[in-house]
Image (cartoon, grey):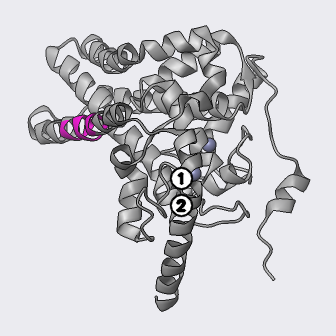
Amino acid sequence: MNMNRSMSVQSDKETQIELKVNSKQKRKMTRANARLKKIQRNFGWAAVLIPLFGSLFTVGLLPYTGINPVVVGLLVSMYVLTTFGLEVGFHRHFCHHAFQTTTAVRVILAILGSMAAVGHIIHWVSHHRSHHQDSDRPRDPHSPYLNTKGECFNTFYGFWHAHLGWFFESEFPNVLLAKDLLRDPVIVKVNQLYLFWVFLGFAIPAVLGGVFTGTWIGVWQGLLWGGFVRVFLVHHAFWSINSICHIYGSRPFNTGDRSTNNIWLAIPTLGESWHNNHHAFPNSAIVGLQWWQIDPSAWIIRVLKTMGLVWDVKVPTTAAIESKKVRVE
Ligand SMILES: [Zn+2]
Ligand SMILES: [Zn+2]
């Protein structure tokens, strides 16, 4: 406990110094712009509150509406599809170029990821690349160890900041970090239509709920479970990667940051909770590097590769994996 406290004090001093040194660079890497920061803050309020109140309302209605296989099917299928869009598409393909694919698959993945309502693809990729560039260092937009004021690590505050507080506290990222996407007219179009894809993410389960049950109640249940509850669950699963997977869990690799692996988040995040593996090999299409590390996103990439829809799949060599392992003296 005391040791932790002295480590925190030490890292606080280091952080203050590093923040001063990096303040000029920080301005270059982020858009220190009050208007953009306000947009990000408003997005944060909407992303946190709308799915939360929608989910509470849905659960409150349970004694009257009950739950049925159609509702469960819509919730699970919409969760899996949009999370694949986010993890296979936004993250492994667009952010890290872990594999190459056709324009049609790129568009489908970008649309599915946008339906997860985590923000415009170009903003999301810019944020995530800035996280990797300065992971758990002052310019990291959502490190649990540092905040924009350079305060020392506090588990509760760090968890809050990394999970969702960063929407309200961090600077808007420099979108030039996603220069490759800005140069792609198809992805720019998908990016511009972001709100339409979010709307579609709510409309599709509502329509399917009505079609499968033949009732108006089915339409509402589809909207609530496949829309609001699904978005709430996807958001918190992915925000847990920033918070839980940088605080708790194992660190088999030397990554120079505090990223961790967590088995119990592997299924909800479709493989991204092997986050220490990911920070060790960010461009790898396979994040679950051991046979027992469940990585459904890697399964999908392998299936698409077998179908000839994906190629140049990047995977680290055994020697590279061995060289980054933490050595126990
Ligand atoms: Zn991370
Ligand atoms: Zn990443």
Q: Along the horizontal axis of the image, is 4 left or right of 61?
A: right
Element assignment for label 2: helix
Q: Position of residue 99 (x, y in %)?
A: 74, 28
Q: Position of residue 90 (x, y in %)?
A: 57, 30
Residue type, numbered disc 1:
Ser
Callout 2 touching callout 1 (CB < 8 Å) = yes
Q: Along the horizontal axis of the image, is 168 left or right of 297?
A: left
Tell me the residue that label 2 is attached to. 20
Residue 84 placement: quadrant: top right
Which residue is located at x 23 percent, y 39 percent? 49
Tell me the residue that label 1 is attached to. 23
Residue type, numbered disc 2:
Lys
C-alpha separation, residue under disc 2 versus residue under disc 1: 5 Å
Q: Is residue 143 above or below residue 141?
A: below
How packed is label 1: few (under 14 Cα within 10 Å), some, or many (20 or more)? few
Q: Along the horizontal axis of the image, is 172 left or right of 106?
A: left
Principal SS element in the magenta part?
helix
Q: Along the horizontal axis of the image, is 84 left or right of 321?
A: left
Range of magenta residues: 45-53
Which residue is located at x 49 percent, y 30 percent? 123
Residue located farthest toward the right when viewing the structure as drawn: 319
Q: Position of residue 74 (x, y in %)?
A: 36, 26
Give the camera-side residue of 276 and 295.
276
Element assignment for label 1: helix
Q: Is residue 166 above or below residue 147?
A: above
Q: Position of residue 112 (x, y in %)?
A: 49, 22
Residue located farthest toward the bottom when viewing the structure as drawn: 2
Which residue is located at x 39 percent, y 40 percent? 235
Q: Is residue 64 on the magenta stretch?
A: no
| Image quadrant occupied by the C terminus | bottom right
